[in-house]
Image (cartoon, helix red, strand yellow):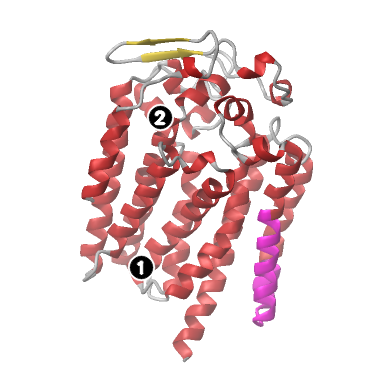
Amino acid sequence: MASLLNTVPSLRLPNISIAQRVRSSSVSFTRRNFTVRAAETDADKGVKSTVPDKAPAPATAGNGSSINQLLGIKGASQETNKWKIRLQLTKPVTWPPLVWGVVCGAAASGNFHWTLEDVAKSVVCMLMSGPFLTGYTQTINDWYDREIDAINEPYRPIPSGAISEDEVITQIWVLLLGGLGLAGLLDVWAGHNFPVVFYLALGGSLLSYIYSAPPLKLKQNGWIGNFALGASYISLPWWAGQALFGTLSPDIIVLTLLYSIAGLGIAIVNDFKSVEGDRALGLQSLPVAFGTETAKWICVGAIDITQISVAGYLLGAGKPYYALALLALIAPQVFFQFKYFLKDPVKYDVKYQQPAINTSKLQLLSGTCMMTTQVTKYRGKQ
């Protein structure tokens, strides 16, 4: 905890230096707000890119979606209400997989019961994993991505100046400390001798920080950053739910980390909308490193092959109905991959993400739940 508290204040240190990477840009600061306006990027100097021709026009005050704004996804309307802006920064659309991960982990523990106390514990764990720590992750990521967003999405809350520097920093701290506080409460509530949920929350928070913040900034490397992101979304809430109601064993940890390969594919989807800014600022996302055509196949391959392999595992374990259920969940995501994503991953990323990625995340967690439940039962018979 102490190391984290000594590290996170560095959030105030980085200065916006877009001028080093963006020609003819202007940056203006006041104590309470700042605005960033990018005029000419490296792409304007002859770097070939097909992204600007395919990307949808940015939302403005008159034509954006208020629902998208509240969910924190592309195509959002401009807002002046600070609470709506704060909610937008936490990206509520990303919470459901974390919430579902807690459910799966609790179920796989074999010790969850439909009592008022167990339900209350799981709800608090969901709040910790979703609104608080995922909200912290998304807010800190937007903070450190403000230079890239000034190129890709200048209408977003931070680069547009809709929310001030101090307000963003305050939100980061409130969400972080709130999430860690709930984690400590859960350990006390569960009677843990070792505060396993707190350390899971602390480790996840540190991973979120080094994913977004320099000097490590894991997201600069497409493979490492996307796997870290995918593993966090799949494994951490799972581990928290299972540790809260049962025992978190090494075989379950390894199993969920292997299954996180599919999470890597899901994380790549978000990189396509940022190709222009990533290229200009030197970030080696997979669409930048391999090109959009190759990266889109890496993306769907990581998702589909992992999920089909799990269905095969369940079939081999004598659970044909589990396997068929997973294949039934895979089918719609493959349909949307060919209908939208593989045609144009930039233009159709939102249309693909809303139905297919959410189905994919639920399928991933459901598949992991079935596998870990099998492992738990097998271990109990030995």
Residues tagged 2 and 1 counted as in contact (Cβ below 8 A):
no
Question: Callout 1: 10 Å neighbours few (<14), some, many (20+)?
Answer: many
Rendered location of residue 10, percent (x, y) = 29, 33
Q: Earlier in the sequence, mark 2 or mark 1?
A: 2
Rendered location of residue 214, percent (x, y) = 41, 36
Question: Callout 2: 10 Å neighbours few (<14), some, many (20+)?
Answer: many
Local SS, label 2: helix
Rendered location of residue 136, percent (x, y) = 36, 40
Horizontal side, residue 356 vs residue 71: left or right: right
Residue 325 position (above or below residue 160): below
- Judging depth in this view, the residue of 15 and 359 nearest the camera is 15
- Judging depth in this view, the residue of 144 and 236 nearest the camera is 144
Which image quarter: residue 244? bottom left
For residue 150, say whether it is visible. yes
Furthest-bottom residue in this view:
382
For residue 321, say whether it is visible. no
Which of labels 2 and 1 is toward the front? 2
Residue 188 is tagged as none
Q: Which residues are magenta?
A: 302-325
Identified at 48% across, 17% down, the residue is 20
Identified at 70% across, 60% down, the residue is 305
Horizontal side, residue 195 vs residue 374: left or right: left
Identified at 51% across, 41% down, the residue is 219
Separation of residues labelled 2 and 1 (CA atoms): 31 Å
Secondary structure mostly seen in the magenta stretch: helix
Name the residue beneath numbered marker 1. 243
Residue 143 is tagged as 2
Amino acid of disc 2: Trp
Local SS, label 1: helix
Rendered location of residue 284, percent (x, y) = 59, 37
